[in-house]
Amino acid sequence: MKVLILTNYANGLYLFRKELLLSFLEEGHEVFVSLPPDENVEKLRTLGIADKKINIIETPFERRGINPIKDFGLFRAYLKMLDKQKPDVVLTYTIKPNLYGGLACTLKKVSYLCNITGLGTAIENGGILSRILLRFYKISMQKAGRVFFQNKRNLDFMSRYGIAVNNHAILPGSGVNLKEHSFEEYPSERKNICFLAVIRIMKDKGIEEYLEAARIMKIKKTKLRFFLVGEYEEETRNEYEPQIQALDKQGIIKYLGHIDNVAEVMAASHIIVHPSYHEGLSNVLLEAAACGRPVLVSDINGCIEAICEGVSGLTFAAQSTEALVAAMEKILALSTEERRSMGVAGRAWVEQNFDRNMVIQAYKNAIAQIVK
């Protein structure tokens, strides 16, 4: 069987879905991946088993731009790709591959599965663009063999607009590789207590609340340290980079940029913070829990599924610095042993509910049904 995967970001595919790709190779399938070229593509090129490798189709497009001419070029590229590769099944991830890839598969009568990893800012913010995208989704998802959602809120929202009403399913996010993300002993708090946020640097991921909370808490408790991992979105770099550089120089936060060893930084931290406004299902939280760290999360779908409130972490109102500060103070009021126990409970929660093997099996079951 020939499997074609359409996505918008090499590193996301490598970090969260490489096990699925390898399982296809192990079963003797050919795997082709279409995505925009960047420095992370090489990770996928080297992925393989013996002499079986991933076939990369570099397909340039703007991940976030809205340019009808360029986007129509992507749609045409997908049509030509389907004609040339003649895949048995297509898997699509993220907005543009879902929309344009789904429509191309519909027109070419190719079996396909879509994964809506989150609704995205354009839909969440409402307005005319949101209405246009929802109509487009309804057309593109109609013939999909399966449309996977990562939380019930997103599924219910799309269903209200007649999208994927009869062909949907819910996945436990991307799951987490429990061997790769092993449990790590809780570090000593003798010198300091470290908070860590692993987020894209943009408003909707809660960067403003995290930075302001760090300012407030450093004044109250000098023993605290605040770390930030993540890359800038180009359209917001000019807004946030000066702020983050200034806070770094003042010793309020330590910005580590985009790094590949996130697991090591998590293991060295005490509390993971995720102040996002909306999520599909946060991979950061699953990995933090797998590592054995207590978490502070926005009280939203896509975050709350990853924790047991009061047992493995605490929730706070999204878009509120005051609520985040209150959550930080609440978890700091606990004893070291209580924070350590929260991390142990988080590990047990992901083992029971978010093993990545569950996601792989769900894909294989769906593919077996629609290809047959």
Image (cartoon, rainbow, N blue to C red):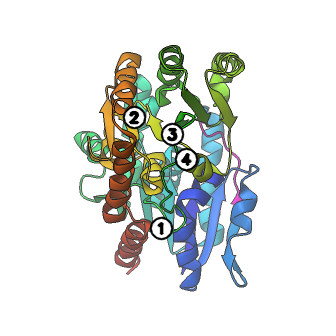
Identify the amino acid type marked 3: Glu
Q: Quadrant of residue 32?
A: bottom right
Closer mark to the observer between disc 2 and disc 4: 4
Q: Which mark is first along the chain, 2 or 3?
A: 3
Main SS of the magenta segment?
loop
Marks 1 and 3: which is nearer the front? 3
Marks 2,1: beta carbons within 8 A? no
CA distance separating discs 2 and 4: 22 Å
**Mark 2 — residue?**
278
Q: In terms of depth relative to the viewer, which is nearer, 251 or 256?
A: 251
Element marked by disc 2: loop
Left or right: residue 341 versus residue 270 is left
Rounded to the nearest whole Å, what is the CA distance between mark 1 and mark 3? 55 Å
Neighbours of disc 3 within 10 Å: few (<14), some (14-19), many (20+): few
Residue drawn at the location 69% of the way across and 53% of the way down: 59
Mark 1–mark 3 CB contact (< 8 Å): no
Compared to residue 322, the image places residue 89 above or below, namely: below
Q: How far from the left and from the top, in percent, is residue 180?
A: 55, 65
Q: Amino acid at mark 2?
A: His
> Which residue corresponds to mark 3?
189
Residue matched to label 1: 110
Mark 3 and mark 2: Cα distance apart in space: 31 Å
Residue 191 on image: x %, y %? 57, 35
Q: Residue 343: image x %, image y %?
A: 39, 50
Q: Amino acid at mark 1?
A: Val
Which one is in front in this view, the residue at disc 3 or the one at disc 2? 3
Q: Which residues are magenta?
A: 56-64
Residue on which the image places disc 4 = 266
Is residue 265 magenta-colored?
no
